[in-house]
Amino acid sequence: MTGIHQFTRIGKVAMVGAFSKITRDVPPFMLVDGHHDEEVKDINAVGLRRMGIGADARLALHKACKLLYKSQLGLTNAMRIVREEVPQTPEVLTLLEFEERRFGGRHGRGDQK
């Protein structure tokens, strides 16, 4: 069982660890464990392979994941670097769009009006 807070978005092909408490958005294509700190662990490699996502796109997502969630750059700076240095696969663009929506809308959901 996993508890998910209201207004929380879970991106496509994301994997949430069992018995997690999720109070923040879960980015698409990522593996998240919410036992203690809701940390993005890595890309959901198994789910991506099952969806037929190629090795190049998985590598690009892995690079984006390291910059966005494992570096000390801050999200805004990391997003800029991902745009400049990581191949812009459809999956990376989806991830960046998901993160951009955090900053708009009610409750940090840019997809709401």
Image (cartoon, helix red, strand yellow):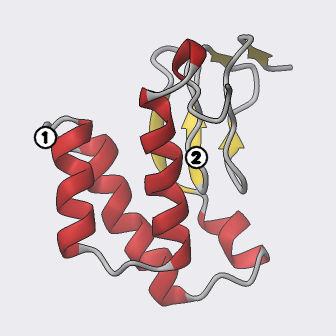
Task: Tell me the crowding category of disc 1: few under 14, some 14 to 19, or many 20 or more residues within 10 angstroms, Cα based.
Answer: few
Q: Is residue 41 left or right of residue 83?
A: right
The percent position of residue 10, horizontal first and vertical second, equals 69, 37
Q: Residue at x 22, y 40 (%)?
A: 76
- Location of residue 9 (image quadrant): top right
Q: Is mark 1 on a helix, strand or loop?
A: loop
The residue sitting at 72% across, 56% down in the picture is 13
Q: What residue is at 49 percent from the left and 53 percent from the top? A: 97
Label 1 amino acid? Leu
Callout 2 amino acid: Leu
C-alpha distance separating marks 1 and 2 = 20 Å
- Residue 99's place in the image compared with 57, above or below, is above
Q: Residue at x 79, y 20 (%)?
A: 2
The residue nearer to you, when weighing 94 against 38, is 94
Q: Which percent across, then down, holds residue 111?
A: 65, 35
Q: Whole-percent x and y of residue 31?
A: 58, 46
Instruction: Read off the residue under disc 1.
Output: 73
User: Looking at the image, is 57 positioned above or below residue 101?
Assistant: below
What is the secondary structure assignment of the residue under circle 2? strand
The residue beneath circle 2 is 31
The mark that comes first in sequence, 1 or 2, is 2
Nearest the eye: 113 or 45: 113
Residue farthest to the right, as pictured: 1
